[in-house]
Each structure stands twice: as structure tokens, then as C-alpha cells.
Amino acid sequence: MELLKRAREHVNEAIKEKKIFSVQGPYPVMRKLLRARGWVEKKFSTTIKVGSRSAQQDTKKVVEEKVEDGGGEEQWEAALHPEPGSASCWTQCWVKILEEEEEQEEVQWYAEDPDGIHDIMSAMVRDHMPTFIWTSRCSAVRYWQLQDHQMVNHFTGTRAFTTKEGLCVNLQNLPSFYQADPTTFFPRCYRLGDEDERQSFIEDFHLTAAHSLLKLAPRIPRGAGHHTPQSMPLPAGPASPSPPELLEKALQVCRMQLDRLEHRDIESDSPVLHVTDADWDHFLHEYYRVVNEQARLEPSVRQQEQCRALLQKLQGRLPQLHMEGIHNLWIIKPGAMSRGRGITCSARLEEMLKLPGKHAAPSVQPGRWVVQKYVERPLLIFGTKIDLRQWLLVTDWNPLTLWFYRDSYVRFCSQPFSLHHLHASRHLCNVSIQKQWRKAGGRHPNLPRDLIWSSHQFQLHLQQVGRREAWENVIVPGMKEAVVAALHSGRELVRDRKGSFELYGADFMFGEDCQPWLLEINVSPTMAPCSAVTRRLCAAVQRDILRVVLDRRENPGCSTGAFELIYKEPIVPVPPSLGLNLVVEGYSLMKPQLQKQQPQDKLPTMLPLVRPVMPKPPVGSRPFMNTRSPVMPKPPVVPRPPRVAKPLMQKHPMVTKPLIEPKRPAVLRPPAISKQLTDTRLPALPRPPVLSNPLMDSRPTVVPKPPVVPKPLTIIKRPTVTKPLERDQASSGAQASGGT
């Protein structure tokens, strides 16, 4: 119970300081680091797979069933010490799964919590929102429900540069808004699903074949063009000569390309070289024979000099001419897949155009493939190809704030490099690919056992081969420039959110001159250790991430570990809005109806705001009126409206015709007692309303309501009734005579 009491106090303190976190996926190091800082985990729902059966369990619900508020000591003990096979022993299931997947490092931290105290604390914070969220996928978070103080390790919209297709498209548009040339750090790339880019790739393949023929010409110095690597054997036997016009066609095609690059084709009077598809097919057929050593070039001395001079001019215009090689090798990749899945290499144009359509992968759409130029002259270590994984951290997109990790690691292929054998074990350095060939024979004895080097070991090797300054002067500056430009290419498509951050993994390949070439940028790079080097570096990266995103908020001068701030955009102040300075010019006018209602002394003077200048009469002409200067006519005087006498309202006007009196409010009266009419001269009908003269009778006239006659109604003609006034006089006279 003492342990539970301390756990409850710890949870209350974490809730008060908003130190609640959620981690999705097996990230034991991140959990351990946050718990050491006093944070409490609110666990995600996890899916546990055992054999062929899968069951989805909500960890929070499992703990709620075992631990309830107000429960007795037996319930707490049952939660702390679950029976074998119960639902609350999910950590033991994770241990078995991770052991099967050979993730020994991730098992270590789960085994450190045998009593499940963290499950109990997770149940205590089930009604509180986490402040720090770490997930392996961006789709696991509902961003529209987040509050401002919550931190998430993902941004939305990053597919613009974290997919091969997105990086290919956006880097093509980079020069329009950022001063960087993507051809200096990113091998040219095309989308096979886009018809325009497909045609551009075909044209590029033809030009690269022409470059290769110029490099294959004999007696060309090594620095100007072709260099045969150690893995490429020289021709062993005699080969048939190629057609003499093959090299001449290659020279013509390269001259046309140089004129286009130097913009000399706009005003050129030279005839344009027209090459049909059939001509290109024949050209490529002969080119394949030469490259595969089935035919040989026999250039003249003049052609050799022309090839040498033309290659030197093209080298200044084409930054990728040196790394192209002579085999015209390209790499085909799915647009949005990782870990080397679906990647193949080919040097045949017809094969690359047909490959996306016949690929058997159901998850890859035929139109989502990209083709990229392969670096045929890479930097080799012990005759083996390498690449480098570099970590990046973005803490803000407006302004763009980029952190560069000083430590990285190098990955090796398991088999020697060769351009004649295009197997994945020789050309793809992904760990998931090479772990299948670690025990295969033919590898160099000096290669590390786990095929991983740290960046410090890589620097020591460069020093041993006489390239001491290459790391600081060529490799690191080149990688920094490449990642800054790549992030700029997709920043307009990323949705910025204050409080979010994201870790990226950039893969680089190096040329013979140590020039870095960006291959791709991965989102959510793996933190699972696959060697002793990655075990140390992955833990250090996660520790330094917390220093940047947590400690630096409270103390901007704190240590950020190996993360270096390499780029932060200046904040451009937005000027305050002062409105527009509007000026109105014209005449002051009044509405006509208002002019008639106002007296003359209150009418406004209709004078122009700007006095116009009258034109002078011509010399010698007779003036219209007189010789005096024209006088500006006065505005017309509006006549004063006549005064209309107000009618005198009499209290009791004389009425010559019966009027309809206004309705009076209903007054409740007692029921009237019916009386017989004394006047027998009139029928027994209701009398019409009598309007008495107000001067003679001051009593109000009561107008009875018409009777409701049931249907059918018998219409009786009413006798002629004299005028109300005459009838009243006759009635009064009869009464007077009767009284007498």
C-alpha cells in the first residue's frame, strides 16, 4: 500500500504540472526518459498479435477493470500481481512478441516493470489529456481536437518531401523560389506516370547514352571523362567495330544539347538535327553493343579531340556528368514505399518503361513509380557500396527552424559493388534488405559484422585513405545545403502547428569525390537498434530531442546535446494596416425632393469646389455678348415654394354624407331588453344606422350588428327610406302631435 500511496502522490503532482505523455508503439527509451523526468504515461490502445490470432485490447479499460476508485486492498493486489493468462498481463505478451522479432532492446524496459505500477498510474490519468504525444504515424492523432499546449511529434502535409514522388516533383520547382540548383545534390528523377515527365526521361536516356559514347572514345584522360572502376573488367577478346557514323551522331546530339544549355539555339541559323524514333532505336541498339563489349569504337584523331573538348564544356553545364558513368544505369522506385521494397535497377529503356505495369505488388499503383539516375561512380569502402543516415529535427515551419544532428551512422552492402550484377545485395544498403545476406559468402573480411559504422569510424577511414578534410569541407556542408533546400521545396504544403515537432532521416550516397547525393528523406525513422552503434545513437537522439522540445522551452540557453541549429528564417515584421488616403472631388448636390421641402434661405449654395477655366475667344473673332471677360453664371435660383395654409380641424365638422365611424373599443354592456317598436309604419327589420347631427344630439350613436340569418335566406324588399335627417324630423313631429 505504501507503493500505491506514492504512486497516487506522483500522479497528482504530474497532473498539476501537466506532465502526462502518450507513446504509441514500442519506444522503450522514450518511455524511460520521460518517466525519469517525472512524467506519467496515458497509454494508447494496442493491438497484440500472438501466432495467427489477433486481439485488440485497450490498456486503459483493462486496468479500469482491475483498479477502481474506492476498491479494497484485494483489488489493488490483484491488479499488481495478475494471474497468468489474464488480460492485465499484456506486457508479458509484448515480451514474447518482441523476442520473436529479435527486438531485444525493446524487451528490456518492459521487463523492468513486473508489478504493473505504470498501468495503475495510467488508469489514474485516464480522464486527463496528454501534454506530450509520440506516435509512429501521423494518422494516429486527431489534430483538430488538439489544444495549444499539447506537443505532437508530427506535422501534416510532409508527404511533399518525405515520399519519393513528392520529393521528385517539388525539387523540380525549387529554383523558382529558392536560390539552389537541385542537380548539384539530387540525382535527376522523373515520374513514369506523368506523360510529360515520361517523355523527358526518354530524352534524358538518349542524351546520357550519347555522353557515354563520348567517354568511351580511346585516349581520353581520366579526369575529363570515362574511368573504369575496379569492378568493371576490360574487354578480354576482340570485338567487331561499331558503325563509323555512331560516334558522329553522338557528337551532333551533344552539340545540340550544349547550344540549348547556352541559349545559342534561339538565333542559330544552322539546320536543326531531326532524329526519328527509328533512328534512336538503331542508335541505342549499337550503344548497347558497345557498352556490353560486343563492339568497339574506332574514332579518328579529330573525333578524339572533339570528344575531349565537348566533354569539358558539358562538365561546366552538367553537374551530374561526372557521376553518370557509361552504363546509363537507372533505379526504379515505388513512389511511397520504404525499407527498399520494390526497388530495382536497369540499364535498358524498354524494360524500365514496362516494369511499373507488370509489377506484382498490389499496394503499388502503376502510375506512382519514379525513375532516378543511379550514381555509377560511388565512394566505395573495401570495394563495397555505402550510404549514410542523417537525422534532422524540425521544430517550426513558420519560420522554418531546422536542427542537424552531429552524429550519424554508415550502412554497408553485404556484397562487393558491381555494375554488371544488379542484385539488391550489391546496390541497396537498407538494413531490412542486407540482413538476409549477412551470412552469405564473398564479402570483404574487413567489413563490420553488423554492417554498420558510426560517423566517427567513417572519418577515421577517410583520414587513412588521405582524405582528412573531406568530412568537414565537403560532406557535412553538402548535406546541410541539401536538406535545407529539400525542406524549402515542400514547406508551402506543410501545415504548421505551434508546439509540434518532427524527426526525419535523410539518406545520402557519396561520389568518388565525396560529393553527397540526397536519395530520400524518411518520416518516423526507426529507433529500433540493429547493432551496437545504433543502440547507442538512437538512445542519444531521443534524449536530445527532449532537451530541444522540452528543456529549451523553459531555458533557451540549455544544452541541446548533439543537435545543432543550422537554419532559422528571419521573422519579417508585418507593417500595421493604416488604411487608404481617400480624396473625393466633385460637386455638392442635394436630392430634388429635399430641395422642394426646404425653405429658400436654407438651401445650399451650389457652387463648384473647383472653379473651371473658361476658354479664351480667338483673336479677331466677334464675341458673343460683349468684350468683357466671361462671367461665371450663377447657379439657378430655386423659387421659394408657396406657403400652404394649414386646414383648420373642427371638432365637429358638418357631415353631408354618412361616414363610417372609426371602430371603438369593445365595451361590455349588460344584455339589452327587447322592446316592441311603436312605429308601425316600418317593417320589423333592424333600423339602419342613424347618424344624428352632432349639433342637435350629443349622445353617441350605437350601430347594432347585423343579425345572423340562417340559410336559406328570404330576401324582403325594404321600403324606401327617406334621408336620415328628414326621417328624424318627421318622427319628432309625429310624436309632438300625438302628445298634444
Image (spheres, rainbow, N blue to C red):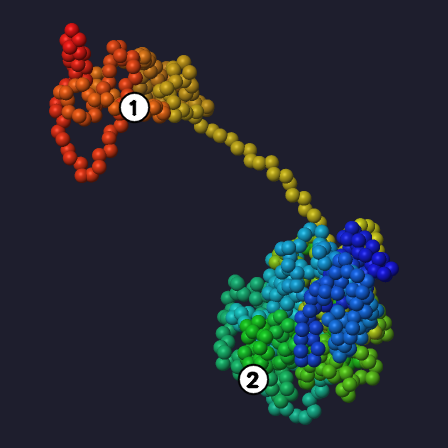
369 or 480, which lies in front?
Answer: 369
Name the amino acid type tagged 2.
His
- Quarter of the image where one finds residue 74: bottom right
In the picture as drawn, the residue positioned furthest to the bottom comes out as 237
Please, is residue 127 above or below residue 289 in the view? above
Residue at position x 86%, y 74% in the image: 464
Rendered position, 713 above or below 598: below
Q: Give the percent coordinates (x, y) of residue 666.
A: 35, 25
Outermost right residue: 2
- Residues at marks 1 and 2 touching, judged by CB atoms closer than 8 Å: no
- Where disc 1 sits, the SS reads loop
Left or right of 160 in this view: 530: right
Residue 672, label in figure: 1
Is residue 471 or residue 598 the one in the foreground? 598
Instruction: Tell me the residue at 19%/21% (across/down).
Output: 677
222 or 648: nearer the eye?
648
- Tell me which residue sits at (12%, 29%) in the image: 717
Q: Which of the 4 image quadrants contains residue 236? A: bottom right
Q: What residue do we see at 25% from left, 21% from top?
A: 659
Q: Is residue 480 visible?
A: no
**How busy is the neighbourhood of tag 1: few (under 14 within 10 Å), some, or many (20 plus)?**
few
- Within 10 Å of disc 2 (Cα), the crowding (few <14, some 14-19, many 20+) is few
Indicate the secondary structure of the residue bearing disc 2: helix
- The answer to whether residue 105 is left or right of residue 504 is right
Q: Is residue 190 above or below residue 480?
A: below
Q: CA distance from mark 1 to mark 2?
A: 125 Å
Q: Residue 448: in sight, yes or no?
A: yes
The residue at which mark 2 appears reads as 285
* Amino acid found under the numbered disc labelled 1: Ala
Image quadrant in which you'd find residue 662: top left
